[in-house]
Image: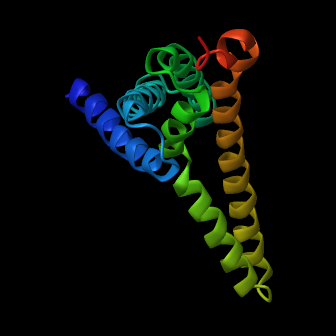
Amino acid sequence: MVALDILSDGFFAAVAGIGFGAISDPPLRAFKMIAILAALGHACRFCLMTYLGVDIATASLFAGLVIGFGSLWLGKRVYCPMTVLYIPALLPMIPGKFAYNMVFSLIMCLQNMNDPEQLDKFMGMFFSNSLIASTVIFMLAVGATFPMFLFPHRAFSLTRH
């Protein structure tokens, strides 16, 4: 059952990664690698959070590192820049639940301006969800771009002979 959970998580992330990749119009040879990176990154984060109890921000950092190093390695094989591969692979990991709750709590906060108790409740929800969503997005970006800074010559020579 554990393997099925991990595989289904990776499969749905791969489908979403392909969908996000289609928006940016990469070459056809890149779609398979985008799917692989999205599946590996999302499955890594899922395993860290579910089975090891790691928080979402730290798990997102490690998933971003997996996607970043994977795009460095796979980019040479399909002759594509790293960003073509890692940006669509990262997008399925944007924390939509926290972003939605952030906007929802902001709207509820504005609707309850005359009730101090409700205002405090929704302000707390807004700041909590904002902090989590922005931290996760920051960690994903740091993890994915770290290989570019670690191996600058390799990262920028992926499409050169």
Side (left or right) of 9 relative to 130: left
- How many labels were placed on the picture? 0
Identify which residue, 138 or 77, lies in the foreground: 77
Q: Is residue 45 above or below residue 147?
A: below
Q: Locate residue 96, reporting x and y percent.
A: 53, 55
Q: Is residue 123 left or right of residue 141?
A: right
Residue at point 19%, 28% (across, down): 1
Position of residue 77 relative to residue 41, above or below, is: above
**Residue at image point 66% right, 17% down:** 155
Q: The C terminus is located in which quarter?
A: top right
In the foreground, 116 or 138: 138
Q: Position of residue 21 (x, y in %)?
A: 46, 44
> Where does the image place residue 26, in percent across and percent down from the top left?
48, 40
From the top left corner, tell me how far across and down residue 143 is, in percent.
65, 25
Q: What residue is drawn where x is 40% and y is 27%?
A: 33
* Image color mode: rainbow
Q: Which residue is drawn at 50% across and 18% down?
A: 70
Residues 51 and 78: in front is 78
* Residue lying farthest to the bottom in this orientation: 114
Q: Vertical placement of 161 versus 2: above or below? A: above
Q: In which quarter of the image is residue 61?
A: top right
